[in-house]
Amino acid sequence: MDDASLTTGPAWANAFGIDCFAWVTAHENKHQVQFNAFWPSGWLSAQDSDHDLLPDSLEPNYMPGRPYDPTTSTTYPDTVGYGQNPIPDFEDIDMRSQISPYNVDQLWKNGSADVEDWASPGKNTKNRY
């Protein structure tokens, strides 16, 4: 989990410390929730031509105004600071659902756990982040 406290980007308002950890764990949980919703009986290769874990039938209309191409697992360039360009479609969907103009699933609010952050370094230690 060390990496989770160091991962950040514009989509998460350049969070650091405990906020990074919270964003990463919430983001990974969102993948699990979406995977279970997309594939309630398990993933089916025949319904996912590009093997990006998004059903071909949902890709063109899943995000309003942002169609994904079911023939490629990387439809768009990374403009949210994910760090992989082009960005994988399943990551693009998760990252964009957390930011404007979509804002369908705000996973975390930076600063929500500042008083609990006693890691070393943390937001309450002598050598703070």
Image: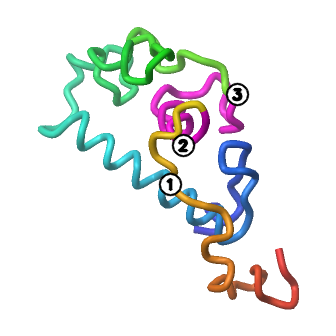
Q: Amino acid at mark 2?
A: Gln
- Tell me whether circle 1 and circle 2 mark residues in contact (CB < 8 Å): yes
Q: Please state the horizontal and vertical placement of residue 64, each as a whole percent of the image.
A: 44, 20
Please tell me whether residue 21 belongs to the stretch shown in magenta. no
Label 1, on which residue? 107
Q: Which residue is mark 3?
A: 79
Residue plotted at (52% across, 40% down): 103
In space, the residues marked 1 and 2 are separated at their CA atoms by 7 Å
Say which mark, if any, is on residue 80.
none
- Looking at the rendered structure, the secondary structure element under dot 1 is loop
Q: Give the magenta range.
A: 80-100
The CA span between labels 3 and 2 is 14 Å
Residue 87 screen position, x and y as percent = 60, 27
Q: Is residue 82 above or below residue 75?
A: below
Of the residues under marks 3 and 1, which one precedes in the sequence? 3
Identify residue for label 2: 98
Element at label 3:
loop
What is the tally of numbered marks visible in this picture?
A: 3
- Seen as rendered, the residue at the extreme right is 127
Q: Earlier in the sequence, mark 3 or mark 2?
A: 3
* Mark nearer the N terminus (1 vs 2): 2
3 vs 2, front mark: 2
Which residue is at a point 57% across and 58% down the rendered structure image? 23
